[in-house]
Amino acid sequence: MSQSGAPIAKKQPKTLEKHGDIRIDDYYWLRDRNSPLTLDYLKAENDYAAAQTAHTQDFQKALYDEMLGRIQETDLSVPTKDGDYFYYSRTEEGKAYRILCRKQGSLDATEEILLDENELAKGHDFFALGDYETSLNHQLIAYATDTNGSERCNLVFKDLTTGKLFPEEIEDMSEVIWANDNRTVFYTRLDDAHRPYQVWKHRLGEDPGNDQLIYEETDEAFYVSLGGTRSEAYVLISINSKITSEIHILDANHPDGDFQIVAPRQHGVEYSISHHPGNDKDSDRFYIVTNEDAINSKLMVTPVNALGKENWKTVIPHRSDVQLKGISVFIDHLVIYERQGGLPTIRIQKLSTGQETNLDFPEPTYSVWAGAMPEFDNKILRFSYTSLITPSSVFDHDMDTHERELKKEMPVVGGYDRNQYQSEWLMATAPDGTQVPISLVYKKGLKRNGTNPLLLYAYGSYGYPSAASFSSIRLSLLDRGMVYGIAHIRGGGEMGRPWYEDGKFLYKKNTFTDFIACAEYLIEHQWTHADKLAIYGGSAGGLLMGAVLNMRPELFKVAIAAVPFVDVVTTILDPSLPLSVMEWDEWGNPNEKAFYDYMKSYSPYDNVTAQDYPDLLITGGLNDPRVSYWEPAKWTAKLRALKTDQNRLLLKTNMDAGHGGASGRYGWLEETAFEYTFMLDSLGLANADH
């Protein structure tokens, strides 16, 4: 095989036409996964990647051992109390998957194993535990399994008193929830485009062929999901597009009843509900977080027997500088999760007195999120906190006394001294003058002289904030003198809903120019140099990688694009694919010429040109239902044909996995070691001691 890569078959190009515009796709044939030519090509690329990285095999192994050596393989999660049981998971050295357990009465009781994922995974090259739920009486568990990475799961039921499985099995499902009769479950099914579109009702012990269809969503822009209120009073069907929502509720004690709509869908309006039963029927109410006439959302409340919007009362009004992300409702407390100044915050309101308390977090950049809290009648708020230098830590906060107890900090084997590391919160200036945050971490003593290797990560889509969280495996980079940065670019949700709106539709290019501005800032301020700058993004972040490499390839030394969404126009024009109709609310509808033209102007695959590109590692998953394997494959083939340099271009396709890569913690760590080794090798650090 030549250094230029895997041999590519000569097949008839595909002519694609839309709005009078003609595109010639030379590699459209790679979409046929049943063709021997396609599989041969993917395998040849994998062989080429192995050959091109053979000289780093020893370093890969050493790096894997180094990263694994920091992980406490035999470990235990913080138990969560639910009724008379304490639920937890644990891991054992040498085993790739979790063991789900519980104890009754106290933590000193005998352990009961609910599910051993290691046993369930036997005989499968890939395994993932999907949705799972215990019944209200804690005697049954429904759980879903995925054995090929397609995210199409099979649902089974287990009697926890006998350990035996019920005879029925339900295929092609996604989510499940129990009603309060401990006999009825509701579950979602997927259509051919991998869209959860139906809700079915199943009675335990009966033939699934007799299951009742409860709801079917015919609008391809919407998907359905299931949930329940923390009060355990209601089952929820949530129907969502990317920008619109609608919720149907059912009394969980009456599973044969009819679902009732809370508020009919209204284009561009999203809402979520939380239930508080109050002290009597007159105070039984729903709290509603909605963005109607409130881009950063507001909190409303209404009686459960008066759902009409004319009855909704404002609890927290809209604020332009604070985004309301969500709430948790307890019997006498309302926990409010917000974002302000780019960072997450938590405040607590005592319902009986109205007194409010803000929780303080001292670091310049961090992440915090709610933990498992199934009990409604509770005064303990559990949350997890982490930063770029603080390992993930679980806290219990007494909402009456405000005493905080650290339940567990993620252990780092071999010792870890956070005082050796420094984090920063910086601001780069985008071309339009917008200030774009950057989270940075490095080992103290670093000299800012423009010679430091730096890895810059970003995502920048769907309104998802990029979490500034701790990673023990990242220490293998920091201890080799690397700086690690997160570019909190538009399209994400760091700075409120407008931050997201300014990085989607016909403003999507702000995402790319923001990232470039962050890279230029880090170079200008001597944190790194273009010859030392590595970049990483996955999925929609892989689109980001492709776009910025087309726009400014000279700015980067090496790039990793994991399961990248790069064939934007062709994919979103195809309604049979997962990234199509549902995605129109994110990227725009290319059946409209303005969106088509705009997408085509930045689509990475459509904009590959004859120019030099940096070292590039591209990954894919043959069974990926979110970004089809052919997107990274086609992109790689086109890059090989057009790029003008001799830099490395590798495609590595996991032939047994989906969007998340290898299953099990060891498989994932091997993939990470491969990616890190490729990057460090390109930066001349693959043999560096530290």
Image (cartoon, rainbow, N blue to C red):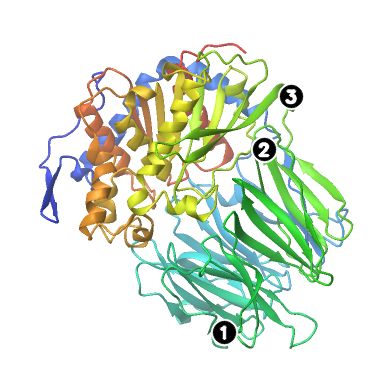
Residue at screen point 28% across, 42% down: 602
Residue 41: horizontal and vertical position, in percent? 25, 35
- Report whether 492 appears left or right of 372: left
- Report whether 128 appears left or right of 336: left
Residue type beneath disc 3: Gly
**Residue picked out by circle 3:** 414
169 or 291, which lies in front?
A: 291
Q: Is residue 38 above or below residue 104?
A: above
Residue at screen point 36% across, 47% down: 508
195 or 32, which lies in front?
A: 195
Between marks 2 and 3 in the image, the one whose residue lies nearer the viewer? 2
Q: Quadrant of the C terminus?
A: top right
Give the quadrant of residue 158.
bottom right
- Crowdedness near tag 3: few (<14), some (14–19) or many (≥20) residues, C-alpha within 10 Å: few
- Is residue 563 visible to the viewer in this orientation of the structure? no
- Report whether 456 appears left or right of 545: right
Q: In 3D space, how far apart are the residues under numbered discs 2 and 1 (Cα atoms)?
A: 43 Å
**Residue picked out by circle 1:** 310
Tell me which numbered mark, 2 or 1, is placed earlier along the sequence.
1
Residue type beneath disc 2: Ser
| Helix, strand or loop under label 3 | loop
**Residue picked out by circle 2:** 387
Q: Is residue 642 above or below residue 311?
A: above
Residue 435: horizontal and vertical position, in percent? 50, 39
- Crowdedness near tag 1: few (<14), some (14–19) or many (≥20) residues, C-alpha within 10 Å: few
| Helix, strand or loop under label 2 | strand
Residue type beneath disc 1: Glu
Tell me which numbered mark, 3 or 1, is placed earlier along the sequence.
1
- Crowdedness near tag 2: few (<14), some (14–19) or many (≥20) residues, C-alpha within 10 Å: many
Q: Is residue 100 above or below residue 94?
A: below
Q: In 3D space, how far apart are the residues under numbered discs 3 and 1 (Cα atoms)?
A: 60 Å
Tell me which numbered mark, 2 or 3, is placed earlier along the sequence.
2
